Amino acid sequence: MQINIVEIIAAFMVLFAIIDIPGSIPIILDIKSKSGDVEPGKATLVSFVIFLAFLYIGSPLLGIFGVDVSSFAIAGSFIIFLIGMEMVLGIELFKHNSTGGGSIVPIAFPLIAGAGSITTILSLKAEYHSINILIALILNMVIVYFVLKLTSWFERMLGIGGLHILKKVFGIILLSIAIKLFLTNTGIVLPHVM
């Protein structure tokens, strides 16, 4: 067990950028408006458990189901694509209930513990000691919890007009991320248009 501050900071920064919880605020607010309330503790705990599973038994876990990381990423890209479509078109594809069901899907997975962040965990494991990744992950989960806890404050601060604009913009960004994730993991290369 080797605790290394440099490794912790590096892993923290990489995970913070990939999880991008501040960038997910408009999506979380949209899900909250449809499903009632988001349970910060539940969403944080479930995403943390998913991360832990992939940190310690990642590839073998997927192997049990005969699934590779690329297939997992493609499945996540479909969910992200559908969330983006909901936000841009103002339609409802996911049936949200009023019991905080949105806390697990799509918030815990794939927004927080998505294909990109899970793949990153597997990549970091090849570079850093597991204990340092674990500490970096715990620090990120603390931030995730507080951002989820403060969604009502963000909602008041942005107002209805601000939320509507952010929802459309982030919907398009989500669609782009989903397409990139799909293309990267299928190996399809789009022609460059000049």
Image (cartoon, rainbow, N blue to C red):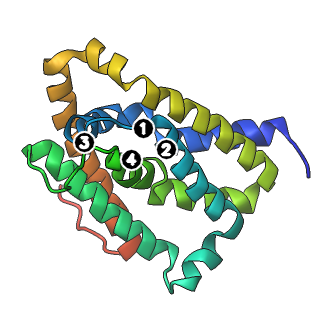
Q: Which mark is nearer the camera, 1 or 4?
A: 1
Local packing at callout 2 (Cα closer than 10 Å; few below 14, some 14-19, many 20+) is some
Cα–Cα span, label 1 and label 3: 11 Å
The reply to whether the C-beta atoms of the residues labelled 2 and 1 are less than 8 Å apart is: yes
Q: Identity of the amino acid at label 3?
A: Ser
- Please give the name of the residue rendered at 41% of the width and 52% of the height, measured from the top-left corner: 104
Cα–Cα span, label 2 and label 1: 5 Å
Instruction: Find disc 2 in the rendering and name its residue.
Output: 42
Cα–Cα span, label 3 and label 2: 15 Å
Instruction: List the single residue furthest toward the right.
Output: 1
| SS label for mark 3 | helix
| Badge 3 or badge 4: first in the primary sequence | 3
The reply to whether the C-beta atoms of the residues labelled 4 and 2 are less than 8 Å apart is: no
Q: Which mark is nearer the camera, 4 or 2?
A: 2
| SS label for mark 1 | loop
| Badge 3 or badge 2: first in the primary sequence | 3
Local packing at callout 4 (Cα closer than 10 Å; few below 14, some 14-19, many 20+) is many
Instruction: Find disc 3 in the rendering and name its residue.
Output: 35
Q: Nearer the viewer, residue 133 or 46?
A: 46
Local packing at callout 1 (Cα closer than 10 Å; few below 14, some 14-19, many 20+) is some
